[in-house]
Image (tube, grey):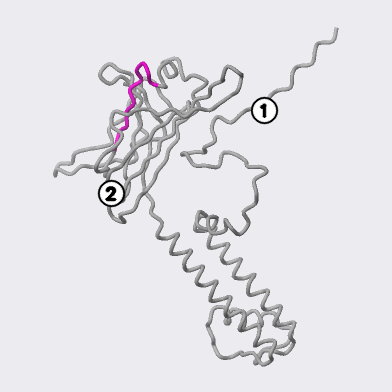
Amino acid sequence: MKAPDAPPSRPRRPRTLLGPGGSAGNFEQRGARGAGLADLYHHLLTAGWGRLIGQMAVGFTAFNLIFALLYLAGGDCINASEPGNLLLAFSFSVQTAASIGYGAMAPTTPWAYLLSNLEGFLGLIGMAMASGLMFAKFSRPTARISFSSRAVVNDRNGVPTLQFRMSNERGNQIVEAQLSVVALIDEVTAEGERLRRLVDLKLLRDRTPMFSLSWVAMHPIVPGSPLFGRVGPEGVAEDLVAIVVNLTGTDDTMVQTVHARQLYGPDDLHWGMRFVDMLENSDDGHIIVHHRRIDDIERA
């Protein structure tokens, strides 16, 4: 008797939409309307410095190469150049676009005058846009906040307490720093619809007037807590997807709002452990912050 065919395996659903460290991108978008050039500024602003400079270099080269080919199409239209010499035409294009003006080469025909005027105008616009983009990217407020890569659960005053910690690596102060912590929980409705619910986790202290050294955030796992019954010595419940942490505050140097984010998955929660102290008092009365200890834990 032939055994019945096994039902097709369902594709594994991702645990969370967020990537490592709470970054977005652990998903794929399909069917979205293409933004085209409308999102070009956002794309360039969020790109890394190496990628941004590389893309600008490629764009600058392509722009000048196009005009160099147009100059070659005009024949002998550039003084002190050679007809058909792409290198000299490209050099003249770079001088025109960047407003260098060495004086060795100059347009000699109406076609070359028209192209040089157009290229000079577009070059000014391009330089202005590139300068504005570089300044905007350089002046973006950022925070150097380190989060512990794992969270621990141990008893505080007889109550199991979820804990994670942060440190300010910049050494300045983040004024009125505030934490927002939510748990992502999967649930199935009575109709069988699968939903992902965001539930706030109440902290013992969710804000501090000055964040300059380190900060241990604590959430008591008591009846009424979304983690009660979901986190214990035996492990983490399947419906707990992740814990997302958002920190906001005002950088006292730039007087601008800064943000930081971290995500903790089920495998990042350690029961019965505690953090190793990362603060030390020196002999001369100074406080030493050991940032490399931020992930160190030990048995409680």
**Tag 1: Cα neighbours inside 10 Å, few (<14), some, or many (≥20)?**
few
The answer to which quarter of the image holds residue 15 is top right
Q: Earlier in the sequence, mark 1 or mark 2?
A: 1
The image's mark for residue 11 is 1
Q: Residue furthest front?
A: 191
At horizontal 53% and vertical 24% (from top left) the residue drawn is: 186
Q: Which element carries disc 2, helix, strand or loop?
A: loop
Residue 266 against residue 211 in the figure, above or below: above
Q: Quadrant of the N terminus?
A: top right
Badge count:
2
* Label 1: which secondary element: loop
Check disc 1 and give the amino acid type.
Pro
In this picture, residue 62 sits left or right of residue 206: right
The circle drawn on residue 265 is none
Residue tagged by mark 2?
Answer: 171
Q: Which residues are magenta?
A: 215-225
The residue positioned 54% from the left and 73% from the top of the image is: 125
Q: What is the C-alpha distance between the residues marked 1 and 2?
A: 46 Å
Front in this rendered view, residue 230 or 36: 36
Q: Residue furthest right?
A: 1
- Where, quadrant-wise, is the C terminus in this rendering? top left
Q: Which percent across, then down, holds residue 149?
A: 41, 35
